[in-house]
Image: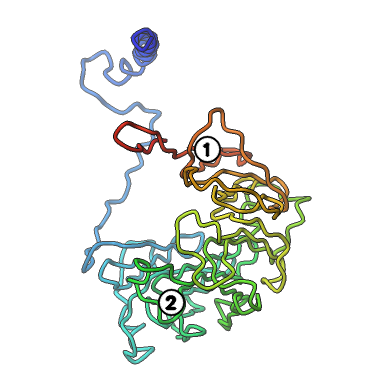
Amino acid sequence: MIMEWAKVLLLVLTVGAVRSAQAQQPVLQGLTGRAGPSRHLLSSCDTTPFPELTPTFLESKVAGVEWAGADDQHVFIVSSKHAVWRSKDGGSTFEDVTERFNASIKGEEKVSISQIMSHKASPNLMLFMNSGEYMWTSNDYGETLNPHKNPGGFRGLGTTLKAHPTRPDWVLAHAKRPGCQLLDEVQMRCASDLLVSLNAFTDHTWTNLTANAAGKVAGFVDWGWGVTPCNKTSCDGLGLVDETVYSTMYEHAGDWDTAWDPDVHFVRSDDWFKTIKKKVPCGNQFELLGRQVYLAVSNKCPQDMAGKPRKVDPTAPPGITLHTSDDAGMSFKAACLPVALRQQGYELLETHDNAGAIVIVDYMVQMPMGNLQAS
């Protein structure tokens, strides 16, 4: 059967190649002309020459690039040795501005910029996160820098920022707790807080959502703005508000200690976690695509989707089951795969029309010598 399909495939490719060659003949003839095989541009082609690119040599490899503004004139580069380079002419020339950051804090900590953000509506407003305890704001594309100590002493290393899709002043920050060391990840899960700023690019004040939860949340795992997909497709009728935040979290210190942990739960809050609008037991990781929420739920969960107790087979294989919601996370149903698989993970690819997703399933195959992971 494999050989038969191979013949069919070869036939299709051969036919396609013949047709492609036939279609190209007039083009090739136009390029070669009657005089012979020497190629030349047709009179209808655009002969406008492009300016020669001038390379810029940095002190180390490029680690990240950020364009500020729609005109692409202001470009920032962070190098692998943590230097910051700025261009004001679309990348034609660059200037090392690392010392400006260092001078603004009088060398209090090493300058090692880990993330750069520009305001989507007013790109002259910039936010620079250091790996240490400082962030900088700027209202003139980094010409002047205003240093700010991070609230609660959290460090930029291991912190991720996400701007709100429709409220450009709003920023979420997922930050490891102060005192957390890198090696803590080897021994135990390092607790992280979720913070929000409604003026991150100007006054730079932050609210800790873990504190807002008043004991309902011990640490945040996965997180994101609820209206993230709404700039690509309509979210009308879903009941989302600008303050909607989705997250996976655990309720007691030390609960998150295994992969696909039954002590990690999916939650939705519409008021900065003063209240929790919806909780899904054992929901570990989520993705927002189109109007759907895709949620990976631990197979070791002692509760069903409604929070009622259920029996768990201790001999059953670990892993997850994919659930989907089309009402903004208020209800979920298990995804129905064509075949039964020992699901271990997923990769979701958004369709071009933002209406759905292609789901790639990672699963385990039992073999005589052990389990084999496949997709």
Give the residue type at disc 2. Gly
Residue located at (29% from left, 67% from top): 79
Secondary structure of the residue carrying tag 1 is strand
Residue located at (32% from left, 71% from top): 183
Q: Is residue 190 left or right of residue 102?
A: right
In front of the other: 182 or 303: 303
Cα separation between marks 1 and 2 = 41 Å
Which numbered disc covers residue 248? none
Q: Is residue 165 left or right of residue 13?
A: right
Secondary structure of the residue carrying tag 2 is loop
In x, y percent, where is residue 375? 42, 35
In x, y percent, where is residue 317? 47, 43
In front of the other: 124 or 250: 250
Which numbered disc covers residue 359? 1
Vertical position of residue 343 compared to residue 207: above or below:
above
Q: Quadrant of residue 133?
A: bottom left
In front of the other: 115 or 213: 213
Vertical position of residue 171 compared to residue 265: above or below:
below
In front of the other: 215 or 193: 215
Residue located beneath label 2 in the image = 142
Q: Quadrant of the N terminus?
A: top left
Give the residue type at disc 1. Val
Pick whichever of labels 1 and 2 is earlier in the sequence.
2
Residue located at (49% from left, 73% from top): 126
Disc 2: CA contacts within 10 A as few (<14), some (14-19) or many (>=20)? many
Colour pattern of the rendering: rainbow
